[in-house]
Image: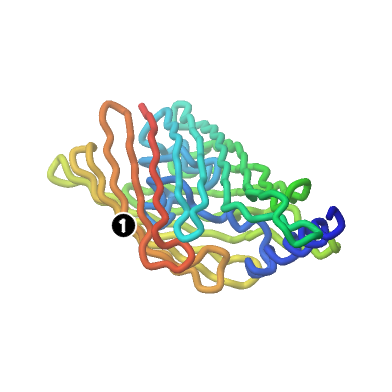
Amino acid sequence: MKKIHTSMVAAVLLLLPAVAGAQALPFVAAEFDASSLGKAGADLVETGSVSNAAFSNAAVIPFAETDLDIAAGYTMWGPTSGNVITASGAYNMRGRLGIAAGFSYGINPSYDIIGANGAPSGSFSPTDLQIGAGVAYRFLDFLSVGTNIGYATSALAEGHSYGAVAADVFVMGSFSGLKVALGAANIGTAITSDNGAKFSLPSSVSIGAGYGRKFAEKHAVDVLLDADYFLEGSIAAALGAEYTFNDLVSVRAGYRHGGESPVPQFATVGLGVKWYGIKLNMAYVLSSETMGNTFAIGLGYCF
Protein backbone atom coordinates (compact mmCIF):
# COMPACT_ATOMS: atom_id res chain seq x y z
CA MET A 1 0.00 0.00 0.00
CA LYS A 2 2.78 2.43 0.88
CA LYS A 3 4.47 2.08 -2.50
CA ILE A 4 1.29 2.66 -4.49
CA HIS A 5 0.28 5.58 -2.28
CA THR A 6 3.70 7.22 -2.67
CA SER A 7 3.56 6.88 -6.46
CA MET A 8 0.21 8.62 -6.56
CA VAL A 9 1.51 11.42 -4.36
CA ALA A 10 4.55 11.95 -6.58
CA ALA A 11 2.27 12.32 -9.59
CA VAL A 12 0.17 14.90 -7.78
CA LEU A 13 3.23 16.87 -6.70
CA LEU A 14 4.37 17.03 -10.32
CA LEU A 15 0.97 17.68 -11.88
CA LEU A 16 -0.36 20.57 -9.77
CA PRO A 17 2.32 23.15 -10.65
CA ALA A 18 2.03 22.18 -14.32
CA VAL A 19 -1.72 22.73 -14.29
CA ALA A 20 -1.08 26.21 -12.89
CA GLY A 21 0.92 27.09 -16.02
CA ALA A 22 4.31 25.97 -14.64
CA GLN A 23 3.72 28.24 -11.66
CA ALA A 24 4.04 26.81 -8.16
CA LEU A 25 2.03 28.05 -5.16
CA PRO A 26 -0.38 30.15 -7.28
CA PHE A 27 -2.37 31.13 -4.18
CA VAL A 28 0.36 33.67 -3.27
CA ALA A 29 -0.96 35.81 -6.15
CA ALA A 30 -4.60 35.47 -5.08
CA GLU A 31 -6.60 38.01 -3.08
CA PHE A 32 -8.38 36.96 0.13
CA ASP A 33 -8.97 40.31 1.87
CA ALA A 34 -12.69 41.14 1.58
CA SER A 35 -12.15 44.89 1.15
CA SER A 36 -9.63 44.41 -1.67
CA LEU A 37 -11.49 41.54 -3.30
CA GLY A 38 -14.57 43.77 -3.60
CA LYS A 39 -12.46 45.86 -5.99
CA ALA A 40 -11.14 42.78 -7.87
CA GLY A 41 -7.87 42.96 -5.93
CA ALA A 42 -6.93 46.45 -7.16
CA ASP A 43 -5.25 47.51 -3.91
CA LEU A 44 -1.60 48.44 -4.54
CA VAL A 45 -2.24 52.12 -3.71
CA GLU A 46 -5.29 51.66 -1.46
CA THR A 47 -4.78 53.84 1.66
CA GLY A 48 -8.19 53.46 3.27
CA SER A 49 -7.64 49.80 4.19
CA VAL A 50 -4.04 48.61 4.65
CA SER A 51 -4.46 45.66 7.01
CA ASN A 52 -3.30 43.19 4.33
CA ALA A 53 -0.21 45.21 3.30
CA ALA A 54 2.04 42.28 4.29
CA PHE A 55 0.64 40.44 1.24
CA SER A 56 0.55 43.43 -1.08
CA ASN A 57 2.44 46.73 -1.05
CA ALA A 58 4.02 47.67 2.29
CA ALA A 59 5.01 51.10 0.93
CA VAL A 60 1.36 52.14 1.22
CA ILE A 61 1.38 52.07 5.05
CA PRO A 62 2.97 55.51 5.74
CA PHE A 63 0.25 57.09 3.55
CA ALA A 64 -2.56 55.26 5.37
CA GLU A 65 -5.56 57.19 6.64
CA THR A 66 -5.28 55.38 9.99
CA ASP A 67 -2.53 54.55 12.50
CA LEU A 68 -3.56 50.93 13.19
CA ASP A 69 -5.52 48.65 10.88
CA ILE A 70 -6.13 45.00 11.79
CA ALA A 71 -8.51 42.43 10.31
CA ALA A 72 -9.49 38.77 10.33
CA GLY A 73 -11.38 37.13 7.52
CA TYR A 74 -12.91 34.04 6.00
CA THR A 75 -13.16 33.16 2.30
CA MET A 76 -15.28 30.37 0.82
CA TRP A 77 -13.59 29.55 -2.47
CA GLY A 78 -16.31 29.15 -5.12
CA PRO A 79 -16.75 25.93 -7.08
CA THR A 80 -14.15 23.91 -5.15
CA SER A 81 -15.62 24.82 -1.72
CA GLY A 82 -12.18 25.45 -0.28
CA ASN A 83 -11.95 27.52 2.90
CA VAL A 84 -9.38 30.20 3.74
CA ILE A 85 -8.93 32.01 7.05
CA THR A 86 -6.77 35.12 7.34
CA ALA A 87 -5.44 37.49 9.98
CA SER A 88 -3.33 40.55 9.26
CA GLY A 89 -2.50 44.04 10.42
CA ALA A 90 -0.46 47.17 9.76
CA TYR A 91 0.78 49.99 11.97
CA ASN A 92 1.59 53.48 10.72
CA MET A 93 4.10 55.30 12.93
CA ARG A 94 3.65 59.07 12.55
CA GLY A 95 3.32 58.83 8.78
CA ARG A 96 6.97 57.81 8.35
CA LEU A 97 7.55 54.20 9.36
CA GLY A 98 5.16 51.31 8.73
CA ILE A 99 5.17 47.67 9.79
CA ALA A 100 2.87 44.82 8.78
CA ALA A 101 2.28 41.13 9.43
CA GLY A 102 -0.15 38.58 8.04
CA PHE A 103 -1.23 34.95 8.02
CA SER A 104 -3.49 32.87 5.78
CA TYR A 105 -4.45 29.19 5.97
CA GLY A 106 -6.42 27.42 3.28
CA ILE A 107 -8.15 24.04 3.57
CA ASN A 108 -8.98 22.45 0.23
CA PRO A 109 -11.52 19.69 -0.51
CA SER A 110 -10.45 16.26 0.70
CA TYR A 111 -9.79 13.26 -1.53
CA ASP A 112 -9.82 9.52 -0.86
CA ILE A 113 -6.58 7.60 -0.45
CA ILE A 114 -6.82 4.32 -2.34
CA GLY A 115 -5.00 1.30 -0.98
CA ALA A 116 -3.34 -1.59 -2.83
CA ASN A 117 -6.62 -3.55 -2.80
CA GLY A 118 -8.45 -0.70 -4.58
CA ALA A 119 -10.45 0.26 -1.49
CA PRO A 120 -10.31 3.68 0.24
CA SER A 121 -7.93 3.65 3.20
CA GLY A 122 -8.64 7.17 4.42
CA SER A 123 -8.78 10.71 3.14
CA PHE A 124 -6.59 13.79 3.04
CA SER A 125 -7.36 17.53 2.80
CA PRO A 126 -4.63 19.54 1.04
CA THR A 127 -3.70 22.78 2.80
CA ASP A 128 -2.01 26.07 1.89
CA LEU A 129 -0.19 28.24 4.41
CA GLN A 130 1.25 31.73 3.99
CA ILE A 131 2.90 34.00 6.55
CA GLY A 132 4.54 37.34 5.93
CA ALA A 133 5.87 40.55 7.42
CA GLY A 134 6.70 43.93 5.96
CA VAL A 135 8.32 47.26 6.69
CA ALA A 136 8.10 50.63 4.95
CA TYR A 137 9.70 54.06 5.25
CA ARG A 138 8.47 57.40 3.89
CA PHE A 139 11.71 59.24 3.16
CA LEU A 140 10.05 62.18 1.38
CA ASP A 141 6.65 63.70 2.03
CA PHE A 142 5.42 62.28 -1.28
CA LEU A 143 7.54 59.11 -1.62
CA SER A 144 7.95 55.85 0.31
CA VAL A 145 9.60 52.46 -0.13
CA GLY A 146 8.49 49.14 1.35
CA THR A 147 9.39 45.48 1.35
CA ASN A 148 7.70 42.26 2.45
CA ILE A 149 9.18 38.85 3.07
CA GLY A 150 7.19 35.69 3.65
CA TYR A 151 7.00 31.94 3.46
CA ALA A 152 4.35 29.91 1.63
CA THR A 153 3.81 26.17 1.63
CA SER A 154 1.33 23.62 0.27
CA ALA A 155 0.70 20.16 1.72
CA LEU A 156 -0.70 18.06 -1.14
CA ALA A 157 -0.61 14.69 0.61
CA GLU A 158 0.31 13.27 3.98
CA GLY A 159 4.05 13.66 4.45
CA HIS A 160 4.46 15.50 1.15
CA SER A 161 4.62 19.30 0.96
CA TYR A 162 6.64 22.00 -0.74
CA GLY A 163 7.32 25.63 0.13
CA ALA A 164 9.25 28.74 -0.81
CA VAL A 165 10.45 32.07 0.54
CA ALA A 166 9.28 35.13 -1.41
CA ALA A 167 9.64 38.90 -1.21
CA ASP A 168 7.92 42.05 -2.51
CA VAL A 169 9.60 45.42 -3.06
CA PHE A 170 7.65 48.60 -3.94
CA VAL A 171 8.11 52.33 -4.29
CA MET A 172 5.04 54.53 -3.90
CA GLY A 173 4.28 58.18 -4.49
CA SER A 174 1.30 60.29 -3.47
CA PHE A 175 0.59 63.57 -5.25
CA SER A 176 -2.57 65.22 -3.98
CA GLY A 177 -5.39 62.86 -4.99
CA LEU A 178 -3.19 60.78 -7.31
CA LYS A 179 -1.25 57.76 -6.01
CA VAL A 180 1.14 55.52 -7.96
CA ALA A 181 3.23 52.46 -7.07
CA LEU A 182 5.80 50.35 -8.89
CA GLY A 183 7.57 47.20 -7.78
CA ALA A 184 8.11 43.47 -7.92
CA ALA A 185 5.95 40.85 -6.20
CA ASN A 186 6.52 37.23 -5.16
CA ILE A 187 10.20 37.12 -6.10
CA GLY A 188 11.55 33.98 -4.50
CA THR A 189 12.97 30.53 -4.53
CA ALA A 190 11.96 27.85 -7.03
CA ILE A 191 9.97 24.74 -6.15
CA THR A 192 11.42 21.28 -6.83
CA SER A 193 9.04 18.37 -7.37
CA ASP A 194 9.70 14.76 -6.34
CA ASN A 195 11.25 13.95 -9.72
CA GLY A 196 13.58 16.98 -9.64
CA ALA A 197 11.60 19.28 -11.94
CA LYS A 198 11.70 22.95 -10.95
CA PHE A 199 8.76 25.36 -11.00
CA SER A 200 8.84 29.09 -10.37
CA LEU A 201 6.58 31.23 -8.21
CA PRO A 202 4.05 33.57 -9.89
CA SER A 203 6.57 36.44 -9.77
CA SER A 204 5.56 39.72 -11.36
CA VAL A 205 6.46 43.32 -12.05
CA SER A 206 3.46 45.31 -10.87
CA ILE A 207 2.23 48.86 -11.20
CA GLY A 208 -0.71 50.50 -9.44
CA ALA A 209 -2.46 53.84 -9.72
CA GLY A 210 -5.43 55.42 -8.02
CA TYR A 211 -7.32 58.65 -7.74
CA GLY A 212 -9.67 59.67 -4.96
CA ARG A 213 -11.91 62.66 -4.43
CA LYS A 214 -14.25 63.81 -1.68
CA PHE A 215 -17.18 66.07 -2.47
CA ALA A 216 -20.29 67.56 -0.83
CA GLU A 217 -18.75 66.77 2.59
CA LYS A 218 -20.17 63.25 2.95
CA HIS A 219 -19.29 61.61 -0.36
CA ALA A 220 -16.04 60.04 -1.59
CA VAL A 221 -15.09 58.13 -4.73
CA ASP A 222 -11.90 56.15 -5.39
CA VAL A 223 -10.86 54.55 -8.67
CA LEU A 224 -7.95 52.07 -8.65
CA LEU A 225 -6.01 50.30 -11.40
CA ASP A 226 -3.38 47.57 -11.01
CA ALA A 227 -1.41 45.83 -13.78
CA ASP A 228 0.90 42.82 -13.48
CA TYR A 229 3.47 41.41 -15.88
CA PHE A 230 4.22 37.87 -14.75
CA LEU A 231 7.77 36.81 -15.50
CA GLU A 232 6.63 33.68 -17.31
CA GLY A 233 5.13 36.00 -19.96
CA SER A 234 1.48 36.69 -19.11
CA ILE A 235 -0.24 39.98 -18.29
CA ALA A 236 -3.13 40.72 -15.94
CA ALA A 237 -4.93 43.91 -14.89
CA ALA A 238 -7.56 44.87 -12.33
CA LEU A 239 -9.86 47.90 -12.24
CA GLY A 240 -11.79 48.71 -9.07
CA ALA A 241 -14.00 51.50 -7.78
CA GLU A 242 -15.39 52.43 -4.37
CA TYR A 243 -18.05 54.90 -3.30
CA THR A 244 -18.23 55.85 0.39
CA PHE A 245 -20.99 57.76 2.16
CA ASN A 246 -20.20 59.68 5.32
CA ASP A 247 -17.19 57.43 6.06
CA LEU A 248 -19.78 54.88 7.11
CA VAL A 249 -20.95 52.74 4.17
CA SER A 250 -18.87 51.73 1.13
CA VAL A 251 -20.04 50.11 -2.09
CA ARG A 252 -17.40 48.47 -4.29
CA ALA A 253 -17.07 46.81 -7.69
CA GLY A 254 -14.21 45.57 -9.81
CA TYR A 255 -13.11 43.54 -12.80
CA ARG A 256 -9.90 41.61 -13.33
CA HIS A 257 -8.60 40.48 -16.70
CA GLY A 258 -6.48 37.43 -16.08
CA GLY A 259 -5.56 36.21 -19.55
CA GLU A 260 -3.04 33.36 -19.25
CA SER A 261 -1.83 34.56 -15.85
CA PRO A 262 -1.99 32.52 -12.61
CA VAL A 263 -4.95 34.69 -11.48
CA PRO A 264 -8.15 34.00 -13.45
CA GLN A 265 -10.57 36.49 -14.95
CA PHE A 266 -13.45 37.58 -12.71
CA ALA A 267 -15.76 40.40 -11.67
CA THR A 268 -16.63 41.33 -8.09
CA VAL A 269 -18.98 43.38 -5.98
CA GLY A 270 -18.46 44.38 -2.36
CA LEU A 271 -19.93 46.16 0.61
CA GLY A 272 -18.32 47.69 3.68
CA VAL A 273 -19.57 49.25 6.91
CA LYS A 274 -17.43 51.15 9.43
CA TRP A 275 -18.65 52.29 12.86
CA TYR A 276 -16.37 53.78 15.52
CA GLY A 277 -13.39 52.06 13.93
CA ILE A 278 -15.04 48.63 13.67
CA LYS A 279 -15.16 47.42 10.06
CA LEU A 280 -17.26 44.75 8.39
CA ASN A 281 -16.43 43.99 4.75
CA MET A 282 -17.95 41.52 2.30
CA ALA A 283 -17.16 40.59 -1.31
CA TYR A 284 -18.70 38.27 -3.87
CA VAL A 285 -17.11 37.00 -7.11
CA LEU A 286 -19.17 36.87 -10.31
CA SER A 287 -18.74 35.40 -13.80
CA SER A 288 -15.76 33.11 -13.31
CA GLU A 289 -15.49 29.37 -13.96
CA THR A 290 -12.71 28.94 -11.40
CA MET A 291 -13.77 31.54 -8.81
CA GLY A 292 -17.50 32.04 -9.37
CA ASN A 293 -19.57 32.17 -6.15
CA THR A 294 -16.48 32.89 -4.06
CA PHE A 295 -17.52 34.82 -0.96
CA ALA A 296 -15.26 36.67 1.47
CA ILE A 297 -16.06 38.36 4.75
CA GLY A 298 -13.77 40.28 7.07
CA LEU A 299 -14.04 41.91 10.48
CA GLY A 300 -11.51 44.52 11.53
CA TYR A 301 -10.65 47.53 13.62
CA CYS A 302 -8.82 50.73 12.80
CA PHE A 303 -8.05 54.09 14.38
**Percent position (x, y) of residue 239?**
38, 62
What is the quadrant of residue 198 in the picture? bottom right
In this view, the residue in front, 6 or 180, is 6
Q: How many marks?
A: 1
Residue 147 appears in the rendering:
yes
Considering the image in quadrants, where does the N terminus appear? bottom right
Q: Identify whether 261 is placed above or below 89.
A: below
The residue located at (62%, 39%) in the rendering is: 131
**Percent position (x, y) of residue 163?**
72, 49
**Percent position (x, y) of residue 134?**
59, 38
Considering the image in quadrants, where does the C terminus appear? top left
**Percent position (x, y) of residue 277?**
31, 28
203 to the left or right of 253: right
236 to the left or right of 25: left
Q: In terms of secondary structure, where does tag 1 sit? A: strand
Residue on which disc 1 sits: 253
The residue located at (74%, 49%) in the rendering is: 161
